[in-house]
Image (spheres, grey):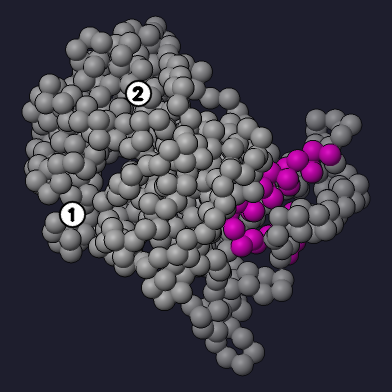
Amino acid sequence: MAGGHGAGEHEAGRWDFERLASRRAILFADLVESVRHFKREEARTFDRWHRYKTLVHGRVATVHAGRLVRTTGDGLLLDFAHAADATRAAFDLHRELMAFNAGESPDKVLSLRVGLHLAEVVAEEHELWGHGVNVAQRLATLAHPGQTVASAALRSMLGDGVQADIQDMGERIVKHLDEPMRAFLLSTPGAPRNAHLPSTEDLRPAVAVVPFVALPADPEHDALGHAMADDIIASLSRHPGLRVLSRASTAAVRGQALPLSRLRELLGASFLLTGQFYLRGNRVRLSAELCELRDGQVLWAGGVSGEVDALFDGQDELVPHIVGQVSQQVLAHELARVRALPMDSLASYSLLLGAQGLVDSLVPKDFNIAHGVLEHLSERHPRQAAPHAMLASWHLFKALQGWTHDAPGEAEKAYVQAQRAMEKDATLPASLVADGVSRAYARRDFDGATASYEEAIRLDPHCAPAWARLSECLSQRGLHDDSLQAVGRAISLSPLDPQRFVYESYAARTSFVVKRYDVAADLARASIRRHALHAPSHRLLVASLWMGGQQPQARGAAQNYLRLLPNARAGDGQNTGAGQAAVTPFVQALHDAGLPF
């Protein structure tokens, strides 16, 4: 623990750490090359650093609702209640220090390395106790001058492009920590992206439904806010005159005080539905507001109450009331009530959300835990299709990542799980997507896969996974322009979706097939930037560079692949379309670089 010998003790005896600890966002900043600066101009450097620390205490920490815990020589330790506040404070620390460098020669410029972590700590007036402080310090060592590096725990609380532009650095070995750490490079949001994506203009108005916020704030109630938003999204998405963004995208802006112009830029939406809810026993009251993002005009605001149990049994009028109000305001006619799949309980819904996050992490340890969670859910709810559909994705991810010596066996397991999902609910888009993917990979049945994707899209025109997977089948049939349009549609429906890296990988595959190797490489890089552990994107990047005549860059990309994924295999899961086409140049690049595989 940070703080030395006294950690965890008190004058009256030993602390109860678990009782006293709270979850905080920890910021550690380290002055780069402090020894050189103080040795060269001790008095002047001390004066500049002292004035800067005073500014941090009086301005940066206060503005971002944080606290300067202590300063020790060339280091700063701050803590915050929220990850977003800590992130904005980190950017301000760098920005404010730049002002102190105005007019200085390059050798006198002061710069910081910043580490951010989210952990349980015990806070005192001038100290934080807990292992999380050490983690933040170690993360700072991974940063270059002027950079901010965050842990996976803190990154999970941020939206890429919202609070920060996020680049996945993969797993890194950090001194004094037993296991490698997943690290993410954070930079100020606002960089332009997706220049190579095809146009997917849609004249229908787009609605963004942000998961509702509990008042008073209570993490235990968060799942209810997400669940109500899911039901509203599922109902609104059935209306042919509306486009509705996925909840996975809008969740990234939940609770963020962003200008409407920035929300419109991030989400690409015309209308925004937000709300707060109050929970008392089994009763929930939701206050919602619909606004037009172009000029901020509030189109409708109102409240509605209901029973939580009735809500998830499909018997309550809360969701249909909100849906009716939104559709009347945007399209001037009512929308008939259509309900999404209800989970049996909020606890189960939370488990399903957690399992999806574990799968998306692609960290083997977490990934394997997800399998147990999903099996538990399938046993607890034998009539529900969703856990089986997600298990099908789990087995396919395992094959595609190269984490198996039996990729065909994993594909067959995915097929079995997909058929179980279809048996339980063949009208659930997730079941149809799982059926299509497993048919393509386990049976090479692209006609059957196409039919499943098209049925999923018919049931839910805004099902981004179905559009993305359909692109592969279209490419397989030689319809490459249609393929790019389909995957572009998936990406446009999911501007902030954690699965966006998969969709960009599909776009890279189709570009690779039509020999647009530069575009394929750019899309593969975009996917890797979002998720550095996605093996198919690495293979596509190496192959695209190799086929594009950039052999030295391909060898470097291959080395980076093996550094990040040392246990992956070259061809596992790449048994269809562009995936298979990319394997040969990928292996060539490895062999040419003299790398064992």
Q: Nearer the viewer, mark 2 or mark 1?
A: 1
Instruction: In this rendered view, identify the residue nearer to me: 207 or 473.
Output: 207
Q: Quadrant of the C terminus?
A: top left
How many residues crowd mark 2 within 10 Å: few (<14), some (14–19), many (20+)? Answer: many
Please state if 41 lies on the left or on the right of 541 as rendered. Answer: right
**Residue at disc 2, secondary structure:** helix
Query: What residue appears at the point 15 percent right and 46 percent down from the top-left corner?
Result: 425
Q: Provide the residue designation for mark 2.
A: 487
Ranked by sequence position, the earlier of labels 2 and 1 is 1
Q: Position of residue 395 (x, y in %)?
A: 19, 42
Q: Is residue 186 at all visible to an observer of this figure?
A: no
Distance from the alpha carbon under mark 2 to that under mark 1: 28 Å
Q: Position of residue 230 (x, y in %)?
A: 37, 49
Q: Is residue 279 above or below residue 511?
A: below
188 or 493: which is nearer to us?
Answer: 493
Q: Dot 1, crowdedness within 10 Å: few (<14), some or many (≥20)?
A: many
Give yes or no for residue 83 being in the magenta stretch: yes
Write down the quadrant of residue 548 in the picture.
Answer: top left
The residue at the point 58 percent across, 34 percent down is 264
Residue type at the position of mark 1? Gln
Disc assigned to residue 384 = 1
Magenta stretch in the rendered image:
70-99
User: Is residue 194 visible to us here?
Assistant: yes
Residue 440 % position (x, y): 15, 27
**The quarter of the displayed image where residue 66 is located:** bottom right
Q: Residue furthest bottom?
A: 12
Residue shown at 47%/36% (left/top)?
A: 332
Question: With 458 as the anchor, is 489 left or right in this view?
Answer: right
Q: Quadrant of residue 67?
A: bottom right
